[in-house]
């Protein structure tokens, strides 16, 4: 039996307004029986495919922080596994949503919410970008989507030499 490993995880069709970021790779395993292997490299092989993400190990100092249950999701969504960054992200999630992915700051304009999810993405400031990304405001209640979008916002600002934490008033 042979095992082929292919690292993937990059979106070939990024939204133009999104910054280019490096995300954690997903690993795809294809288990191929030796009788299925041929010398022709272009031949396709019937295989069993399983996609998995390697377990993420965090620094001991992070384990008891508020919102630590969302660190693995944050790292999978693009945030670096860096204690300094994750400590700050923990503070933001705790302050903004009390670690609740369905947190909704009531709107004063008749909308369901003004701010959505773990990091409280603001509809008024970002709804055009969300639409360009194909996101509905309620998609921001999904922890992965919310944290991925927050990473794009943070890393896009950092790439421009700006403080990535500014949208959460930490600069």
Image (cartoon, grey):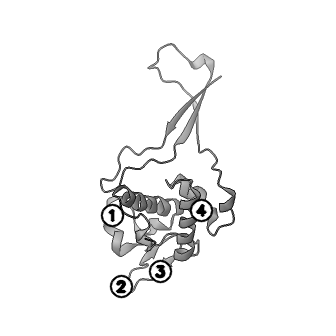
Spatial CA distance of label 2 from label 1 is: 20 Å
Q: Secondary structure at mark 3?
A: strand
Q: Earlier in the sequence, mark 2 or mark 4?
A: 4
Disc 1 crowd rating (10 Å Cα; few below 14, some 14-19, many 20+) is some
Q: Position of residue 146 (x, y in %)?
A: 48, 64
Q: Residue furthest top?
A: 39
Most foreground residue, 62 or 119:
62
Residue 56 visible at all: yes
Mark linked to residue 70: 4
Work out how far the residue at label 4 is from the one at label 3, CA to CA, in angstroms: 20 Å
Report the front residue among 87 and 52: 87
* Whole-percent x, y for residue 25 in the image: 51, 43
Q: Residue at x 50, y 55 (%)?
A: 77
Looking at the image, the residue that sits furthest to the bottom is: 108
Residue 75 percent location from the top left of the image:
55, 54
Q: CA distance from mark 2 to mark 4?
A: 31 Å
For label 2, the residue is 109
- In the image, residue 139 sits, relative to residue 97, either above or below, namely above
Q: Earlier in the sequence, mark 1 or mark 4?
A: 4
Circle number at residue 129: 1
Which element is circle 1 on?
Answer: helix
Work out whether mark 3 precedes mark 1 in sequence or the reverse, and give the earlier one: 3
Which element carries disc 4, helix, strand or loop? Answer: helix
> Quadrant of residue 156 in the image?
bottom left
Residue 70 x, y percent position in the rendering: 59, 62
Residue 105's label in the rendered image is: 3
Residue at 31% across, 57% down: 17
Q: Which mark is residue 89?
A: none
Marks 3 and 1, how far apart in space? 19 Å
């Amino acid at each position: 039996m042979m095992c082929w490993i292919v690292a993937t995880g990059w979106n070939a069709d990024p939204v133009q307004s999104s910054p280019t970021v490096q995300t954690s790779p997903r690993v795809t395993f294809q288990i191929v029986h030796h009788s299925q292997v041929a010398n022709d490299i272009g031949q396709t092989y019937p295989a069993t495919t399983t996609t998995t993400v390697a377990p993420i190990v965090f620094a001991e100092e992070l384990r008891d922080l508020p919102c630590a249950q969302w660190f693995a999701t944050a790292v999978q969504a693009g945030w670096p596994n860096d204690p300094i960054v994750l400590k700050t992200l923990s503070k933001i999630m705790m302050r903004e949503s009390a670690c609740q992915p369905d947190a909704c700051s009531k709107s004063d304009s008749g909308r369901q919410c003004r701010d959505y999810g773990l990091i409280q993405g603001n509809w008024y400031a970002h709804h055009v970008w969300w639409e360009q990304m194909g996101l509905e405001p309620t998609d921001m209640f999904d922890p992965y989507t919310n944290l991925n979008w927050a990473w794009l916002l943070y890393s896009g600002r950092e790439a421009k030499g700006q403080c990535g934490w500014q949208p959460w008033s930490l600069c």
